[in-house]
Amino acid sequence: MRWPEDAKDWPLTDYSRQILHRPHRWHVQEHGTGDTILLIHGAGGATQSFRDLFPLLAQDHHVVAIDLPGQGFTQLGAQQRCGLDHMAQDLHSLCQHEGWTPTLIVGHSAGAAIALRLCELGLRPAEGIIGINAALGNFKGVAGWLFPMMAKALAVTPMSASLFAATTTRSSVRNLIKGTGSTLDARGQELYYRLATDKAHVDATLSMMAQWTLTGLLARLDQITVPVHLIAGSNDRAVPPDVSEIAAKTLPNAKLSVIDGLGHLAHEEDPDAIANLIRA
């Protein structure tokens, strides 16, 4: 999406700014005082994912939310830097550039994997990491090779992002959200529709899928000693709760909370409950 043309009614843009730090032009939202909490969204989302959680946390913390490279309003500077390692490296460099020393990192879905990778790179938050429906497992069975192959094919196929963006409907976005086990209001659905119909955002998301691998990180989970609190929605159909259960048993200093009735977008469905868990 184009900044600032498409941002006029985007959530929380009063707290938005752009930061040119190689290789990307980052969109960040920053507000509040106190200990710093860094918010990292999942694949295909943006800062809008934290539109209701952000102001709750900013009441008593300094909160920073970022758009991942090429997604939302962050302008992608290098197409080949959309995988886990590269995004974590670039985000770590951004934090150093801005002087952000998070006390806590909150990652949703794939954002939780990025948060753990940040710890390995030296960004070790004193209060640890919170993973909301953390995507910390590889696909099983046929999907284990079919889905990554599809993502790679789509990412290198000319016009694939344009075709996806051009053919996406509000109905298809509504069904996709429903398929994750979550229920969002009309505003939440409309924001995802705007993302899904933006070619640059879709292209970056496809590139992230194509370059994504968790093999190395999963093999090292037992070496990550920072406190980790995994929050899973019992109704999550995108990353089932057992993914968090398995990860919690592997991480040396982890605990697990399963929230009844919430799906993959738990922090958008019930931001008050998630904010209370984060504060605790």
Image (cartoon, rainbow, N blue to C red):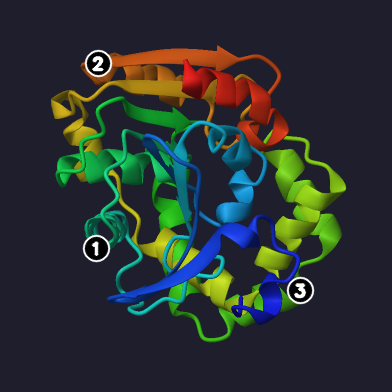
Measure the C-alpha gap from mark 2 to mark 1: 29 Å
Does residue 144 lie above or below 210 as drawn?
above
- In percent of the image, x 43 and y 14: which residue is there? 256
Mark 3 Cα within 10 Å, few/some/many (few <14, many 20+)? few
Of badges 3 and 1, nearer the viewer stands 1
- In percent of the image, x 63 and y 62: which residue is there? 13
| Disc 3 to disc 1: CB gap under 8 Å | no
Mark toward the start of the polypeptide (2 vs 3) = 3
Nearer to us in this view, 129 or 145: 129
- Which numbered disc covers residue 253? 2
Work out whether residue 135 can be spotted.
no
- In percent of the image, x 55 and y 77: which residue is there? 200
Q: Which residue is mark 1?
A: 97
Secondary structure under the numbered disc 2 in the rendered image: loop
Does residue 88 lie above or below 230 as drawn?
below
Q: Quadrant of the N terminus?
A: bottom right
Residue occupying the far front of the picture = 33
Measure the C-alpha gap from mark 3 to mark 1: 39 Å
- In percent of the image, x 26 and y 54: which residue is there? 99
Q: Which residue is mark 3?
A: 167
Rendering coords of residue 103 (x, y %) = 31, 33
The amino acid pointed to by label 2 is Asn
